[in-house]
Each structure stands twice: as C-alpha cells, then as structure tokens.
Image (cartoon, rainbow, N blue to C red):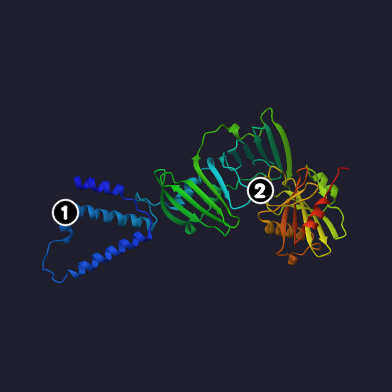
Amino acid sequence: MKSEYQIKRLAKKIRIKPDASVDERVLACAEAVLAKSTKNQDVVPLRRPSIWRTIMKSTITKLAAAAVIIIAILIGVHYLGGSIDGTSLAWAEVVEQISSYTKYKCRQRVVREQGPEYPTMQVYHLNLSQRRQELENGDIHIIDMRGKDAITVELYPAQKKATVTKLIGFGPRKDPHIIEMVKRFEQESTERLGTKEVDGKILQGFRHVPNEHNDFTVWVDPDTKLPVEIKLVHTQTGQTIFLDDFEFDFELDPSAFSTDIPDGYEVKTIINDYRPVEPKEITAEDIRSGLYHTAYTIGKFPWIEKLIMIQTIDPLGTRAIVYLIGVQSKDGNTIIIVQGEYYDGARMVWIPEQQLVLETPLGAKLYTHPNGALYAQCFLESFAEASPEFFDTKDLSEERFTRMIVMPDETILSLSSNKKMSDERLQELVESLIEIKAN
C-alpha cells in the first residue's frame, strides 16, 4: 500500500511541458541504458527468471518504473493531442454543443498594431440580432437588428447624452459574431493544439485558419465542451481580438436590451440609409440634403481640369451612402473627397492618434490613415466603377495615399489621391472647401 501511495504522490508532482532539451536527454539516457545492456550480454544463462518480475520486486525500481510509464503516457498525450485525464475532445463535439446556444456573454479585448485603440467591454448576446456592450469607461451600446430598419443606441451616462443611429434598410439580419464563425470550422482543417492549464482547469486547444485574413485559436473546457478563450488574429490588418470570461445562458433583464432612451438624456439622432442605390452623378444640393452635418464642395482652381460628384455605396463595406467629389488635375492626378454620415466624431475618435501632417492657417488638420493606400484604392476603384470615363483602374498608382481632414467646425472628410501631392497643393485644395448652403 505504501508503494501505491508513493506512486500517486509522484504522479501528482510530475509536470511535463514540451521541451526539446528534455526530449534529447531522455533519448540519450535510453541509448546509454541500451548500450550498457547489450555490453553485459556476453554470457547468457540457458534459463533465468523473468527480468520484469525480478525488477518489480524492489520498491525503488517499482517507483522508477511507474515514473517512466507516467512520463511515457504524458509525452504520448502531448504528441497525440489528447488530454491528461485520458479524454480526447473532437471538434465536432464542440460545434454540436455551442450550436445549441445563441445567448452568451464574454469579455472582449482588441489589440491593434496601429490605428485607434478600442476599449475593453463586456458583450451580452441575447440572440443573434440583439447585443449589449458595456465599455470599461461606463458607456453602453445597444444593437437591435431584428427589424427591417436596424437601430443602435450609444449611451454616455456620465454626460447624460445618447446617440441614436437608425439604419434604414439594414435589417433584419443576424449578428456575424465570432461564435457563429467558430461554428463553421471544418473538422478536417481544424488543428489540435494539445492542452494547457488555466486557473487549475485543463483546457484543450484547437486552431483554424480559414483564409489569409483570419487565424482562430479556441481553448475549450472538455467537461462542458464550450469555449473558454478565443483569439482571432486579423493577419493582414495587425489586429487581434480576445474573448474570454464566457458565461452561457446568463441572467439579465430583457429591458437591458431596450433601445428606449432613459429620461433626462440629451439625444442626437443619425439616420443612415442602407437601401440599395445605383451610383449616379449628383449636384452639390444633393450632398447638402443627404447629410446631417456640414456639407462641402471644392472651389475652382486653374490646375483643376474636371470635377464631378457621385453618390454611391461605401466601398469599405458599411453599406452606407457616401458622396464623392472627384477632381482631375492637369498634371494627370485624380483626387477624391469623401463625405458621409459615417464620418462623424463619435466613430472617428482614432484620427488624432494618427500623424498630423498638415495644419492650414484656417484651422483644418490633415492626418494620416493607418491603411491609407488600401483605403485610397477602394475609393478610386469605386469611382472608376461609377464613372469609368473619369478614372480607369489601370491607371491606379503605387503612390496613392489618404488624408483624413478635420475641419475647424469638426466636420470630418477624407481625401484620397492617386499620386503624390505637395503640401502647398494639399493646403490650397483643403482651404478651397466651401460649405454648401441649403437653398
């Protein structure tokens, strides 16, 4: 009984971690023992008792043998992808389990290599169309996409202010959240990562790389078959999303998901029209009537050869309507000024964190964009699609860039240029922006 107790204590003390040097030492020892054993086999008796039986009569050798067996099992578990307790969780079991849940909460953190920082938040998914986000600074976001016209409410309790955004024609739709993405992992292409211990719990890991843009790592509780940690790396944008502190079937009053504004709040309402529209040429008056904030047009210059205004859908995927003013210069450059309801201070808080490259005497500020070349490409291609005679995508330049413009009245526009522009010309263009007055 004493030997059995000692084996159990030994097993509890053993902690095996993958280590190349440990593997090499184990193999070296095994080779040395084998060599010594072979060397001593000069005289072999015709009959002898079982070597295994003889060895196992010694308490010390029993413990040593037990340790070797345990180590072998643990090493085998690591390389075969099983778990220490002998269970091996299949990815199909995880998918089956989480597919029965649409209601859950978790903590969400976003880490970015560049661009705006996002606050850590607690996210509550009531179902696939309703979500509540509680930010670490006390702000609250509520999203409801059940109806034809989706709605988002941003509450700022410290200031007693609220922003209500109505998205006409955006719904009904389901939330494309990370859990839904995880459900679509394919068993054959999901890599098993082995196990790790978190807060005394042994988790099993899986990795799935569905395309060149996304790299998922999921750690699962083998008892519940539910995610404990999820990491999503957006490989081409330098952004990583972490989800943890999961709670499935949380308790929260349904009123927490109401889009009604509490009494005493100052309310700002924004309407974004997501109904399908065909790109079309418009006038300055159309831009003015389509925007809730100040609308601008460009003044005339000797170096401007052609100017055109286009209404189209935002090529960045927001499905919002945007207004583009395209300029062709006499030196062969194409410049696009972008305006839209999406470009407001509440959403563009990241701009001052970018590099300030120019400030005009009249107070307009120009900042870089974290993905300026890609951003410019999207709008230049969108303009080419809407007006091919104005710009041809075969003329797309590697010099293209983007500048985010913050006007003195805090209206935000963006400028995308196909070719380089001097600071003098940028300043001249920005200072020429004229407010479009309502008729």
Calculate the distance from the C-alpha at mark 2 to the C-alpha at mark 1: 71 Å
Residue drawn at (44%, 55%) of the image: 193
Residue 414 percent across, percent down from the top left:
74, 52
Q: Can you say which quadrant of the picture contains the C terminus? A: top right
Residue 286 as seen in the image, left or right of residue 28: right
Residue 378 percent across, percent down from the top left:
71, 58
Residue 258 as seen in the image, left or right of residue 185: right
Q: Which residue is mark 1?
A: 58
Q: Which three-letter amino acid code belongs to the residue tagged 2?
A: Glu
Of badges 2 and 1, the one in the foreground is 2
Residue drawn at (68%, 35%) of the image: 162
How busy is the neighbourhood of tag 1: few (under 14 within 10 Å), some, or many (20 plus)?
few
Q: Which three-letter amino acid code belongs to the residue tagged 1?
A: Ser
Q: Give the camera-side residue of 363 and 417.
A: 363
**In the rendered image, which quarter is residue 58 located in?**
bottom left
**In the rendered image, which quarter is residue 280 located in?**
bottom right
Tell me, for residue 200, which label it has, or none. Answer: none
